[in-house]
Amino acid sequence: MPRQRKPENKGLPARWQRHHGAYYYFVPPGLESYWDGKRKFRLGTNLPEAYRAWADRLGTLDKAGNIGELLDRYALEVIPAKAPTTQSQNQIAVARLRKTFAAWPLTAVEPHHIYTYVDARTKTVKSADGQPLKVKARTAAMREIEVLSHAFTKAVEWGYLKRHPFAREVRLPGEKPRDRYVEDWEIEACLSIDSKRKKGSVLAAQAYVRLKLLTGMARGDLLRLPVPDFTSEGIEIQRHKTAKSTAKRTIYLWTDALRTAVHDAIAARPNSRSSWLFCNRRGECYINEETGRAGGWASLWRGFMDRVMAETEVKVRFNEHDIRAKVASDAETVEHASALLSHANISTTKRIYRRKAERVIPLDPKDYK
């Protein structure tokens, strides 16, 4: 009987092990020459790095006998093409899926198994005395099922299966869209905070809010704006999030208000020699392109919102995404809102970003005559 894996190694591919803060691969006997002569090969400190190293050594898998092997190929070929943050999330999802499905034959999954999986991840775990210990995450389970579904879509493409086992046969309720609408007075309040310095975090955050209110740009696009690339027409972008899936580009035409907001952002930079409109003290872009994260900006925004909550009448926090939704909600038409947000699909604008109550004119009584 094979030895049971330690908890930290469950969900990892066969012969992988988490040890001293890194992932290792235990090389099968006789294959050491393919792994620099080592019996225990260090893959990397995080899952994306480990999978890349493993892919470089193994190459593409040409068959899959079970779901674990399908997920391995998916992790090697599909996930690396995604955005860095999505890669990390997908690798975690793959690890969790492997804990349940790794040994299952590809043809064993049926729709009811998907419902069971999500329900199991949603239930409250109780201790021996009946006290609840934690609530398992339904949202995380939904994301994991999305990864599993896409893996099966690829399985059909790769010739492992003739049909997807649960496509269009599972109806899981989606997440309720966020409905926080930021009022005009709340924006005025956060823009009224005094800065203790002529440059720095408060002025940068306020300039950022002004620019987002005018354009509705997503955080990833705003923080990636290079100053020298502004055109004579205005600010031209291709959304980073959808750059690989659509060729849609947007130009925010110059207005007096937009020019002023850009000028304020440039003046607020802590490093005047930087080529980025928003930069840290070293003049670097806040976005780490390897991970897709913007930890420095996230910290700046939290500090700014802490002051907003402490020094103004704002009682409920709002995030940057809520400001983007305010732009969509305040636009006269949904078409204008979708264009501002640079959405390829207007239904996304309607479902998630238009948060104001819809104003309608009652019918005239004469319509009933």
Image (tube, grey):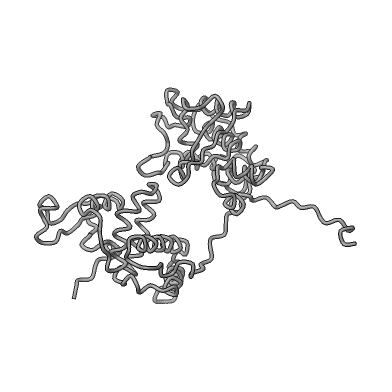
Q: Is residue 126 visible?
A: no
Residue 81 placed where, x, y %? 36, 48
Placement of 213 over or under 84, stated as above or below: above
Placement of 278 over or under 299, stated as above or below: above
**Residue found at x 67% / y 50%:** 356
Q: Residue 297 versus residue 243: which sits nearer the camera?
A: 243
Residue 78 placed where, x, y %? 34, 53
**Residue found at x 28% / y 49%:** 49
Q: Quadrant of the N terminus?
A: bottom left
The furthest residue to the top: 273
Number of callouts = 0
Q: Residue 352 versus residue 135: which sits nearer the camera?
A: 352
Placement of 77 over or under 341, stated as above or below: below
Residue 365 placed where, x, y %? 88, 58
Q: Quadrant of the C terminus?
A: bottom right
Placement of 149 over or under 45, stated as above or below: below
Q: Quadrant of residue 141?
A: bottom left
Residue 240 placed where, x, y %? 45, 41
Q: Is residue 321 visible?
A: yes
